Amino acid sequence: MAVAAVVLSLLVAGWALVAALRHRPPDRMQLIGLAVLELLLLALAVVAGVALGAGERPGEPGAFLGYLVTLVCLPPLAAVLARMEPTRWGSAIVCAVCLVTPVVVVRLQQTWQVLGG
């Protein structure tokens, strides 16, 4: 599921980058991509919540929960900011957020694996 989120995020980032380079505002496909990405990230958060409920614990729960909350908040934030900026910079915002999302996903996994041992 994390791999699907990373791949989708990079695809949306590429789409948004092309739009920004062509001086295009965020289009419906970018917003749909952000919505699907958000659904994947919510599913990832549910899986993490189930694992926490089952007794598994990361070594540093504060950092893990911080990454998890940040991860779930990124796509809606990008959508709101992109809608507020209906120029090419809105597409640049979507691109930037979608490039940050895979980094946060990887850090979330590293926090769980390394610290949770």
Image (tube, grey):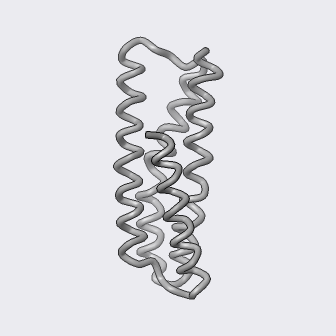
Screen quadrant of the C terminus: top right
Check the image and name the residue furthest to the right.
114
Res 55 → quadrant: top left
**Relative to 53, is 26 on the left or the right?**
right
Residue at point 35% right, 59% down? 35
- The quarter of the displayed image where residue 20 is located: bottom right
Point out residue 3 in the picture as x, y percentages from the top left corner.
50, 43
Q: Is residue 26 above or below residue 61?
A: below
Asked whether 89 or 107 is in front, the reply is 107
The residue sitting at the top extreme is 55
* Residue closer to the observer: 46 or 60: 46
Q: Position of residue 80 (x, y in %)?
A: 41, 67
The residue at the point 47 percent across, 56 percent down is 8
Horizontal and vertical percent for residue 9? Answer: 50, 56
Q: How many numbered badges does the structure rendering display?
A: 0
The residue at 47%/83% (across/down) is 25
Q: Residue furthest bottom?
A: 23
Taking 1 as reference, is 80 above or below it? below
Task: Determine whether, in the image, residue 33 is placed left or right of residue 3.
Answer: left
State which quarter of the image contains the N terminus.
top left
Residue at coordinates 60% horizontally, 21% vertically from top-left? 60
Residue 35 against residue 25 in the figure, above or below: above
- Asked whether 85 or 98 is in front, the reply is 98
Question: Which image quarter: residue 34?
Answer: bottom left
